[in-house]
Image (cartoon, rainbow, N blue to C red):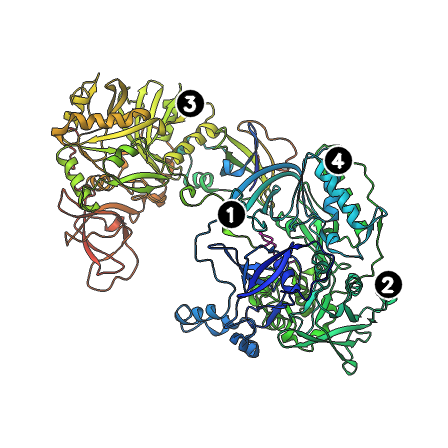
Amino acid sequence: MSQPFRLATGGRIDRARPIAFRLDGRSLQGFAGDTLASALLANGIRLVARSFKRHRPRGICSCGPEEPNALLGVERGPGRFDPNSRATLVELVPGLAATSQNRWPSLRHDLGAIMDRAHAFLPAGFYYKTFFRPQGVWERLFEPAIRRMAGLGRAPDRPDPDRYLHRHAHCDLLVVGGGPAGLFAALLAGRAGARVLLCDEQPEPGGGLALAGGRAPGLDGGPAAAWLARILGELARLPEVTLLTRTTAQALHPSRHALLLERVADHRLEPDPRLPRERLWKVRPRAVLLATGRIERPLLFPDNDRPGIFLAGAARAYLARFAVPVGREVVVATTDDLAYAAALELAAAGVRVHAIVDPRPEPGPLARLAEAAGLPVLSGWTVTGSDGRLGLAAARLAPVGPDLRPIAARERTVPCDALLVSGGWTPSVHLLAQAGGRLAWEPECAAFLPAAAPERVAVAGAAAGAGTLAEALAQAAGAVAALLQELGAARPHEPAPAVDEPARAPSLPPWALEAVWRRDPTAAFVDLQNDVTAADLELALREGFHAVEHVKRYTTVGMATDQGKTLGPTALALVAAGTGRDPAELAPTTFRPPWTPLGFGALAGVARGDLFRPIRRTPLHEWAEARGAVFEDVGNWKRPTAFPGPGESLARAAARECRAVRTGVGVADASTLGKIDVQGPDALTFLERIYTVDLAGLAVGRCRYGLVLADDGTLLDDGVVSRLGPCHFQLSTTTGGAARTHAWLERWAQTEWPELRVWITPVTERWAVLAVQGPKARQLLRRAVSDVDLAARAFPHMAWRDARVGSVPVRLFRVSFTGELGFELNVPSSHAADVAETLFRLGPDLQPTPYGLEAMHVLRLEKGYILVGHETDGSITPLDLGLGRLLSTRKGFLGRRSLLLPEHRRPDRPRLVGLLPLDRERVPPPGGQLVADGKDPPSGPSLGHVTSSARSPALDRAIALALVRGDLAEPGRRLRVAAADSEPIPVEIAAPCFLDPEGARLRG
Amino acid sequence: MLLIHCPWCGPREEVEMQCGGEAGAPRPADPMLLDDVAWTTWLRGRRNRKGPQVEAWWHQAGCGRWFLLARDTRDDRVLGSWPIGAAPPPDLGLGDER
């Protein structure tokens, strides 16, 4: 297995460790240290993808995260499949299997390539213009067909077997980017004693310096590599400096919250099962230095997308790091000096450089070095096109006139297998923009540069527009000194190292050569990944989209997974030129996190499966489980739905449980009800302002049901207030309202009435609650409870007493949410199961029946008791619910004033009513809309909706509660409930209490 | 995620906190004395200022205290925080907010 494009020596790969991998089933070989991209190029493979819309052949063009073309499906074993992986960042490991995407049947013979011929019929906005009618056909017909045809990789179809972890970290200085500027900054800060975290996306630090070859600048009088090694050595010795490689800074949020993604495992030749696959770092640095470097720009010319066209800097990197020359017969087309270094390095490696074309009449000194080395430098020339079928075969070159127009008559076609292009550089300012920094167009760089940074965030090096290494290092030193001073640390005094580098002439931006791309705008790509051409941009402008954000959305330029990293500024400049504006007048499209795509696994971390969210279990959970409970989720709680016997359905079980409560005695776990302890000399004053009912007259030992209103008069929560002592109360809240009500109390106590001496403690988990309900409840409790007189006279409804079950002290509340004689035992949590079992052991003849949530709901529905969140929705007042009797007129309470507003007194406000379906067996669905009676299909405005419904075993019929327009709410009126999948259900309005309206059973 | 400075606990992650919204005028001592317009103006009126705004925050998962905080609504910069009842730190650019 030969690697025809691998040099015999050089590079930082391990030739002693060959690694077998596959592309589309074909066996190939690379070396340890390769990326998938470098290994493919070493094997002479250029064609690796078909483009998104037009299915044009595409190849690797870059060497980093900006890669727009080389997206592959990568499989690293069963279940370990990632679509759309950038081959430039995937490190080669044994057994890696890559598959090309968006082609059928194969990369070389892709039937979808017909789309390229049809591109004239696929202009920008094609889908909007074509598929907007007839209605509905899009979802059923066009969209599925288009999705099959276009799109990127397929999603993994198996659960991810890997582990992902999150780590929180703090540091003085976070340096993003391990290029020379970042390393130097980290060194200075580290020497000053600062705690430094430096992250770099690549496997090895050094940035552009490590990727440049023989023409890298000299530093400190020696080669760059020696300087790098010295710096890395010292950084490793500094105890407070952490250097993270393979770690991408994905986001920088306001208040300097950074998200770093560390790729921990994928690159390991021997997998270590103890390691997570990826680690997401959440860093809170005191200061941030962004040394994120820059990205090279491709040139804009017809057919600028052929496999074999590389960024010049990428060609240097493949040669220096992997000993892979990207071609044997090379043409270089540039508007920037550094491409000459690429030509010189490739020529030194034995590659034939046929021409270096540069439209600038006066390139910098590197060009003269190239000439001196015998390379054919053609100043005042440019590339005008490319030829080839599945890959590059030739470049077209022509001289340009003083107006930069190519002179067609003198065009030459030069056969070549690689074309290196460079249109200058774009500073990577993404993170700064994410964090809220401001950018401004800098005409000299023809790019957006940092103009203002958030507090304690700085940018240095190429990201800040530094054109030379000396400038970059000086910026880094200055920025670190300023940041450390802001942190109050010692200001380091370190001279930047001497740099030996050639001067640079100004480069020419890719869009300067307008006459070149105008020769065929439909093949001059400004977004390689989304297949957007200069012609598409022009069309958008012609159709009136002038704002950059509109053009972006209409043409999808810059919206692919690479987010337009290579050609984004070119697209913006074309929009500016096409609308007669200067780029400085336009703002770049918003930079949003993340910087590069990342998997859901890393974001989720350990929060999957059982750890997806916390599960709350009551102290009686095991007891209920042992009794055969079937559980359901209520918020984070697990609550028993019902306790079905063998072969019994949930519905039958619930009906049986209801009958037991109505005729015997039922026992339920009500521990999830919120409980709040309120104490203090001013506790009564405080609660009087919170609750709608009078509490002043509430004696110690008594309880009262009350409402908690928002100050706008709507119902927040309801519950029972029990007076435990003169200055001591316990409140009960709904299960879902426990946290909300506690927050509400704290807010008023702390913000508006801080003068009140009151202490509020949530005690929900402190007490388990056993509801013992039914006509035989007292009989059962008599056997279990001591130290209390249970007789009705001594212990009336809405009272509480201290008591004991065996040796366990309990609080016994005589309250009922069922309408039956009932008690609720508050038992210290640790004794809950014992007490529950005691009840069952002592009363076999009474047949105590465990009942669940379903029965609870039916029982309270029969009584017309409201359930916050069912009968209320944040807009409902006590007046709507017919609970005016609970509104004190003696005192001020929150919400009272608002209930006097005319809006709350309108006769057509919603009103709580009962519904009796005419067909006793048809249960109207909760949420079902109420419509007028009659035979017509339901139409017109909704008259209200069903809030709760059930089949009542006690009444042997369907019942419901509803909120209906108040002016229609008189009993006896007939309405219908519209049902989604059946005939409307005729109902008759009734009083909302269906059973024992006098409450005789309650007081028994 | 914002870093919120609790006056008692120091800088803490936003997830520990609940924002109680813009801090408005104190609640009228006796709302029943107000006419409908005056009452609803207090109830619903918010400045929704572009710039420094005073908000009430609750350090729910920490010390459990409510406190006041000035935040620039343009860029989410936290300008300062102080206990209920205390005076705001000077020079927060709050203008006539308090």
Residue placed under numbered mark 3 in the picture: A758
**Sequence-earlier tag: 4 or 1:** 4
Magenta range: A588-596
Viewed as shown, does residue A333 lie left or right of A539? right
Q: Contact, CB < 8 Å: mark 1 with mark 3?
A: no
Name the kind of residue labelled 2 in the image. Answer: Leu
Residue placed under numbered mark 4 in the picture: A191
Residue placed under numbered mark 2 in the picture: A369
Chain where mark 2 sits: A
Are marks 3 and 2 in one subunit?
yes
Kind of element beneath mark 1: helix
> Does the rendering let one see residue A88?
no
Task: Name the disc covering residue A315, or none.
Answer: none
Kind of element beneath mark 2: helix
Residue placed under numbered mark 1 in the picture: A603
**Magenta part, dominant SS:** loop
In the depicted view, which residue is nearer to us: B53 or A966? B53
